[in-house]
């Protein structure tokens, strides 16, 4: 087998492979001979079919099959011989030649980039220092009560926090569009469930009122066919309901696993859960800084095939999500995910190299510790542990998370980390703090 490789633009390579045609002819002859014993053709006794008949009937198919197998086999042997690391599948085309004794083809593919990890010694990271005060616990309990509120009919104009039951029909340039209608839809004013202007537009409405709103879809709206376009909503209000908050009774607190201890125990449980969410948020924001820094200092070329595949996967995942949420089909172009796909592919390649170069591992003990931590937040911890330990894909998610944590630690040890004080609301709800 003869192999030559030509470097094209960027990461693209064109590899020419040539091998004796007899490699295929021998396989074809053997398979056709075998078919004379196993094939079933009307007019011939089993095992007595002449080779010429078998060749006429099956020759083309057997030859194509043998050629395809040889192409795949020789391709992998060739990239191994040339020490190439292909990214994605190759485009293979046979090369016409007057020399029938040799078969040649060209394989065009991309290779993984060479990565030289750049030091993070000059990078500065900020880690939040946040404490949870009594007023933060009070605010969280207020949110819990609102999340468990009920609504009762009210004979009044709708105000902030009230729920309206509405029917609506939307039109763009007088035409209907996918998902343009809703019947008996509950809308709470102030929750931001609908597009900008919808909730504000129905404020003050009473049961039986009919309204028309002239609004505009956001430019990044998930239904691309109406994104950024003006829309008219014809709305009929069938009911206005006001919120009724639950009382902090023992029965209510028991829903959160508080069997005794009253309000003090409930507040302690709330604070514990707040701390868990806070710790996760602090770690996530530090990780985002580290990942941004890693991308900034390590500028690498990306295989187009990997970016396209990642964008396709993201599009399919988003489409499945919308089909579940909206109960309909949505076409999402892969180009919408190209920027995020590039980030994911780049990080995947760079982080893999960091893990390899620094021999970072997600040890069995670390994996079990993390699963234990997750399991403790559930009613039946052992059941959760067994679930993770018996599903390889879930174990892989835990391992990947641990590797990311260790990469963050590695990055912080290389660079500098400064703590910055925040209140709980400043850190967890920055937009709320800005508008307060």
Image: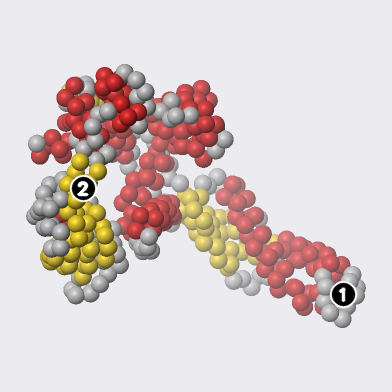
Which numbered disc covers residue 201?
none
Q: Quadrant of residue 210?
A: bottom left
Lateral position of residue 232 relative to residue 119, left or right:
left
On the image, the x and y values in percent for residue 312 come to 41, 56
> For the image shown, how many numbered marks are present on the structure?
2
Please name the residue shown 38% across and 34% down the image: 117
Comparing 390 with 402, the one in front is 390
Circles 2, 1 touching at the beta carbon (< 8 Å): no
Q: CA distance from mark 2 to mark 1?
A: 85 Å
Quick check: 358 left or right of 430?
right
Which residue in the structure is indicated by mark 2?
152
- Identify which residue, 61 or 92, lies in the foreground: 61
Q: Residue at x 53, y 25 (%)?
A: 364
Q: Which residue carries the number 1 mark?
A: 49
- Of the 4 image quadrants, the one containing the N terminus is bottom right
- Dot 2 or dot 1: first in sequence order is 1
Could you tell me which quadrant the C terminus lies in? Answer: top left
Q: Residue 136 or 44: which is nearer the viewer?
A: 136
Density class for disc 1 (Cα within 10 Å; few <14, some 14-19, many ≥20) is many
In the image: residue 136, left or right of residue 349: left
Residue found farthest to the bottom: 43
Specify the quadrant of the image occupied by residue 116.
Answer: top left
Q: Secondary structure at mark 2?
A: strand
Question: Residue 146: where, in percent of width, then height?
Answer: 22, 38
């Amino acid at each position: 087998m003869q192999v030559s490789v030509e470097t094209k633009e960027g990461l693209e390579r064109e590899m020419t492979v040539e091998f004796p045609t007899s490699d295929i002819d021998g396989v074809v002859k053997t398979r056709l001979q075998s078919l004379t014993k196993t094939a079933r053709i009307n007019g011939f006794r089993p095992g007595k079919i002449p080779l010429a008949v078998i060749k006429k009937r099956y020759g083309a198919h057997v030859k194509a099959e043998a050629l395809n197998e040889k192409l795949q086999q020789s391709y992998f042997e060739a990239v191994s011989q040339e020490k190439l690391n292909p990214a994605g599948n190759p485009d293979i085309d046979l090369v016409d030649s007057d020399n029938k004794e040799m078969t040649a083809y060209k394989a065009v593919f991309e290779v993984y980039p060479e990565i030289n990890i750049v030091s993070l010694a000059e990078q500065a990271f900020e880690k939040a220092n946040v404490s949870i005060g009594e007023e933060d616990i009070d605010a969280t309990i207020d949110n819990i009560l609102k999340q468990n509120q009920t609504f009762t009919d009210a004979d009044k104009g709708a105000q902030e926090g009230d729920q309206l039951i509405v029917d609506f029909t939307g039109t763009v340039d007088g035409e209907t569009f996918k998902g343009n209608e809703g019947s008996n839809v509950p809308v709470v004013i102030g929750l931001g469930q609908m597009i900008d202007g919808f909730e504000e537009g129905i404020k003050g409405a009473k049961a039986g009122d009919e309204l028309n709103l002239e609004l505009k879809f956001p430019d990044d709206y998930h239904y691309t066919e109406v994104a950024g376009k003006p829309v008219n909503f014809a709305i009929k209000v069938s009911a206005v309901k006001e919120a009724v908050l639950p009382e902090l009774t023992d029965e209510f607190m028991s829903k959160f696993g508080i069997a005794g201890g009253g309000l003090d125990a409930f507040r302690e449980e709330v604070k514990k859960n707040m701390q868990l969410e806070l710790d996760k948020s602090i770690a996530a924001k530090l990780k985002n800084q580290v990942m941004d820094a890693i991308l900034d200092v390590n500028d690498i070329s990306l295989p187009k095939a990997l970016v396209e595949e990642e964008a396709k996967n993201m599009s399919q995942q988003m489409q499945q999500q919308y089909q579940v949420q909206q109960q309909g089909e949505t076409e999402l172009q892969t180009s919408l995910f190209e920027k995020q796909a590039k980030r994911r592919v780049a990080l995947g390649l760079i982080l893999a190299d960091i893990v390899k170069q620094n021999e970072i591992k997600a040890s069995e003990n670390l994996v079990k510790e993390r699963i234990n931590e997750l399991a403790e937040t559930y009613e039946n911890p052992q059941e959760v542990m067994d679930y993770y330990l018996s599903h390889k894909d879930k174990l892989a998610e835990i391992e990947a998370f641990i590797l990311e944590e260790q990469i963050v630690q590695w990055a912080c040890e290389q660079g500098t980390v400064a703590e910055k004080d925040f209140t709980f609301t400043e850190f967890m709800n920055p937009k709320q703090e800005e508008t307060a």
